[in-house]
């Protein structure tokens, strides 16, 4: 993902595949922010802000790839 801000719908789809209760709407809504914050709290606790960023998207992609 580099430094680019990831596509919200893709992040939402990844979070849903990972088991978070979010719908891939493409809109950064409260449910998405809460799911992102929970994901970040668990996998990247040094910055928990509920905002999509390249590092969070890369972590999510890597974990999904490992899960198969």
Image: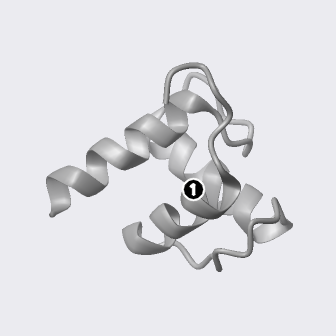
| 27 sits left or right of 63 in the view | right
Looking at the picture, does residue 36 appear above or below residue 19?
Answer: above
Q: Position of residue 35 (x, y in %)?
A: 63, 61
Q: Is residue 36 visible?
A: yes
Q: Can you say whether 38 is above or below 44 in the image? A: below
Viewer-proximal residue among 45 and 50:
50
Question: In the rendering, at what x and y percent does residue 22 appear?
Answer: 63, 76
Chosen colour scheme: one colour
Left or right: 67, with 41 as reference point:
left
The structure residue drawn at horizontal position 75% and vertical position 70%, both measured from the top left corner, is 31
> Residue, x 56% and y 59% (percent of image)?
10
Q: Residues within 10 Å of mark 1 (few under 14, many from 20)?
A: many
Question: Could one spot residue 19 in this view of the protein?
Answer: no
Please say if 4 is above or below 32: above
Q: How many marks?
A: 1
Residue at the image point whose x is 36% and y is 47% from the top: 61
User: Toward which corner of the image does residue 54 lie, by quadrant?
Assistant: top right
As rendered, which of 51 and 48 lies closer to the eye?
51
Residue placed under numbered mark 1 in the picture? 11
Q: Is residue 67 left or right of residue 30?
A: left
**Quick one: quadrant of the C terminus?**
bottom left
The percent coordinates of residue 13 (x first, y second) are: 52, 69
Give residue 24's quadrant in the image: bottom right
Horizontal and vertical percent for residue 42? 46, 44
Local SS, label 1: helix
């Amino acid at each position: 993902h580099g430094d680019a801000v990831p596509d919200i719908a893709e992040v939402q789809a990844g979070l849903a595949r990972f088991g978070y209760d979010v719908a891939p709407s493409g809109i950064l809504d409260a449910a998405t922010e809460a799911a992102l914050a929970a994901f970040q709290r668990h996998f990247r606790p040094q910055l928990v802000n509920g905002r999509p960023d390249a590092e969070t998207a890369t972590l999510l992609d890597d974990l999904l790839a490992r899960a198969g």
